[in-house]
Image: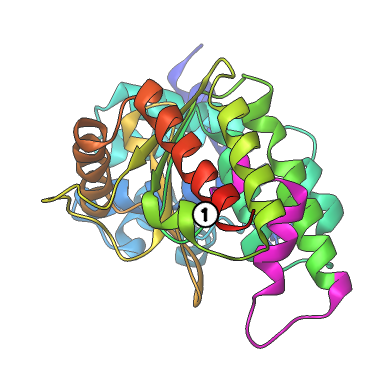
Amino acid sequence: MAAHDTGAADWSHARREDAMALRSNPTLRQRRLGTELRRMREQAGFGGSQLARALGVNPAQITQMETGKTGISVERLRTIAAVCMCVNEDLITALAEIITGREKPGWWETYRGRLSTDFLEVAELEEQARTLSTYTITFIPGLLQTSAYATAVFSQTYPPIPQHEVDLRAEFRIERQHIVHSGGTPYTAFIHEAALRMEFSGPKVRAEQLNALLTRSETPGISVRVLPFNVTGLPSPVDNFTYASGAIPDLDAVQTDSHFGNRIIDAPAHVARFRAILAQMDSSALSETDTRDFIRFVKKEIENKHD
């Protein structure tokens, strides 16, 4: 293809992109693409207006692309990468897969308007991950909870929420579990001893939850590791968190969970910190076999206490 034909083709793609309606509610995946485009531009030392001039577009379009409010073609992605002198071909390829992977709406979309966006984005993050690792200090990980235990946890929310909301949240949490129970996404759960002993419910529900945890710990693709109280020197974060591995390490993300809501973190320095914390946990936690013995011990304590 002649040089002027290539330019015409890129201009044609640009015109199609410009004509696209702005998204009012970009998905997590679309926003991450925009974030990586912004990082690409900033690492080249360009402002939005500079990149707009180089691409021959309006500066507002740069903002729209970087906030995920409008899509771009793979051709435009590669043009931006070239202008920004990005030579990370693995990253460019992974971003191109985000662009071309226009899949049907995720199952969580059926809950839009009934649950907050925080809940939906957790499910979307989990669905897109290549591997998942969680750390919980206050409760059994959501991906391993029984329905009765999940209901008990949501019933402890303060201020209290209506029963129908409790039931809806518990239902959603159980539906999220298919991603790891199917064995399609390798999952490691680091659980602090405090989470095993926290009394959200009565002894029967707690014992059933620990039984379910033991069963799931032997499911292919699921690894459960306990961090006992006597582990020292662990750089533990304040919040429960989920580490979601992307197609490449550059696209890894972390979701933190607290009473103030969910937060999804993708800044490289912060993600690297959580990656280091996971490595420390891996070396400090009980083995899978010792973890099962420990869970049985806690379960026996509960049964003896309430006999």
Image quadrant assignment for residue 94: top left
Name the residue located 30 percent from the left edge and 39 percent from the top edge: 83
Q: Amino acid at mark 1?
A: Met
From this view, report whether residue 164 is shown above or below residue 306: below
Q: Is residue 109 left or right of residue 225?
A: right
Q: Residues within 10 Å of mark 1 (few under 14, many from 20)?
A: many
Q: How many marks?
A: 1
Q: Answer yes or no: is residue 9 visible.
A: no
- In depth, the one of 252 and 101 nearer the eye is 252
Residue at the image point whose x is 51% and y is 11% from the top:
1
Quarter occupied by residue 159: bottom right
Q: Position of residue 233 (x, y in %)?
A: 11, 51
Is 146 part of what is drawn in magenta? Answer: yes
263 over 20 or under it: above or below:
below
Identity of the residue furthest to the left in this view: 233
Position of residue 121 measured from the top left corner of the image (x, y, whole percent): 62, 54
Residue at 62% x, 26% y: name it. Answer: 215
Q: Secondary structure at mark 1?
A: helix
Q: Is residue 150 left or right of residue 244?
A: right
From which residue to which does the magenta span run? 140-164
The residue that label 1 is drawn on is 65
